[in-house]
Image: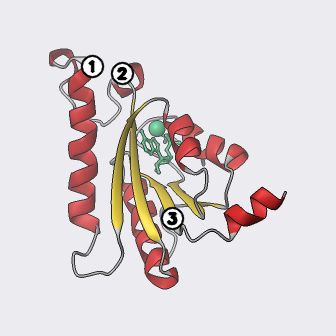
């Protein structure tokens, strides 16, 4: 309990945001950057990659020609491209990136340890059309160790 309180008042001010390259994850990133600007937190943009889940996962990867190592590279480039589009270089917000091999929900929940906020989009690239929440955002909502924001497309930024 004491430890939990100490963690809450620790000087680390980190907002974790999950980016899979989808438009919804771009919205989540924009929301996280804006929140960080308002609160003085840093933003940790995380992309998780995982060989089986990646097949068709980013919607454009030429899958048969790629080996497992390349998927990490694709993920890294995806994250860099999204950040180049969405992060204002003139902003004072400090942004770090993490490219992590693993199951997306597990990776995000792990990153959220000690963070002040976890931000994800309501949907991503995959999943069932018509579902309100994707499986990654559902897992995060249920299991996140910190307050969690699920940014829905169409929400005001
Ligand atoms: N591989 C990933 N790496 C980082 N964040 C992810 C990843 N996959 C999903 N997310 C986050 O979770 C949100 C919801 O995605 P998801 O639950 O996978 O929905 P869907 O089922 O539509 O793909 C995304 O907008 C993104 O913020
Ligand atoms: Mg998904």
Mark 1 / mark 2, whichever is N-terminal? 2
Picture quadrant of residue 4: bottom right
- Residue farthest along the left direction in this orientation: 65
Label 2 environment density (alpha carbons within 10 Å; few <14, some 14–19, many ≥20): some
State the SS at label 1: helix
Q: CA distance from mark 3 to mark 2?
A: 28 Å
The residue mark sitting in front, 3 or 1, is 3
State the SS at label 3: strand
Q: CA distance from mark 3 to mark 1?
A: 30 Å
Mark 3, residue position: 14
Name the disc covering residue 51, or none. Answer: 2
Circles 3 and 2, Cβ within 8 Å, touching? The answer is no
Judge whether residue 60 can be spotted in this image: no
Q: Residue at x 49, y 76 (%)?
A: 35
- Residue farthest along the right direction in this orientation: 1
Circles 1 and 2, Cβ within 8 Å, touching? The answer is yes
Mark 1, residue position: 68
């Amino acid at each position: 309990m004491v430890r939990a309180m100490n963690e809450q008042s620790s000087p680390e001010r980190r907002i974790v945001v999950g980016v899979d390259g989808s438009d919804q994850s771009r919205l989540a990133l924009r929301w996280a950057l804006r929140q960080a600007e308002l609160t003085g937190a840093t933003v940790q943009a995380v992309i998780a990659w995982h060989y089986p889940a990646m097949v068709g996962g980013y919607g454009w990867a030429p899958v048969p020609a790629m080996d497992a190592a390349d998927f990490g590279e694709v993920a890294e480039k995806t994250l860099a491209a999204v950040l180049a589009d969405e992060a204002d270089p003139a902003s004072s917000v400090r942004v770090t990136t993490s490219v992590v091999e693993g199951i997306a929900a597990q990776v995000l929940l792990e990153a959220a340890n000690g963070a002040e906020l976890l931000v994800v989009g309501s949907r991503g690239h995959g999943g069932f059309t018509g579902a309100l929440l994707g499986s990654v955002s559902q897992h995060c909502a249920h299991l996140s160790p910190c307050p969690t924001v699920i940014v829905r497309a169409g929400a005001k930024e």
